[in-house]
Image (cartoon, helix red, strand yellow):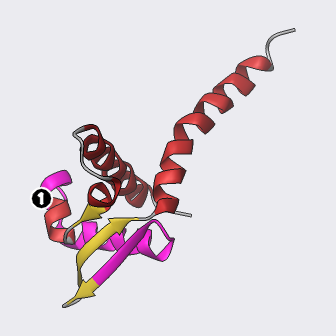
Amino acid sequence: MLTKDSKTVLYHLYKEYCLRRSNGLSRSASKEFDSSESVQKLLFPDWSVSDVDDCMCELGRNGYLDNHHASDFIYDSSLTDKAIVTMENQKKETLLNVVNFLAQFIP
């Protein structure tokens, strides 16, 4: 289970991954993110570095990020295959849930 903040971070990291892929970067290069500080500057300028780092650590503990630490902060991070598969299936699962919900009202 992830906190709402960590889900938000995962969503934005995945969105950035998709943007990189659509711009022609390789899968491996698209998965790579630098430090929690750089992620904060790029995607979460209104958040503190500490909060972004904490969410990224939570994502790492749950298998969504592969993090490397230095001086108590993440200095290198990458999306895992688990994260990409989860986010790819998120859209499909949401659509199926809506269809199943609507099907209850069709005689």
Give above or below for 21 relative to 100.
below
In the displayed structure, does residue 40 sit left or right of residue 83?
A: left
Picture quadrant where residue 78 is located? bottom left
Percent position of residue 65, x then y: 40, 68
Is residue 42 found inside the magenta-colored segment of the image? yes
Residue 45 visible? The answer is no
The structure residue drawn at horizontal position 14% and vertical position 65%, both measured from the top left corner, is 38
The structure residue drawn at horizontal position 72% and vertical position 25%, both measured from the top left corner, is 101
Task: For mark 1, give the secondary structure.
Answer: helix
In the displayed structure, does residue 24 sit left or right of residue 91?
A: left
Q: Magenta stretch: give its range.
A: 41-68
Q: Amino acid at mark 1?
A: Lys
* Foreground residue among 105 and 67: 67
Picture quadrant where residue 10 is located? bottom left
Percent position of residue 94, x then y: 59, 34
Q: Quadrant of the N terminus?
A: bottom right
* Foreground residue among 2 and 78: 78
Residue count near mark 1 (Cα–Cα under 10 Å), binned few <14, some 14–19, many ≥20: some
Which residue in the structure is indicated by mark 1? 41
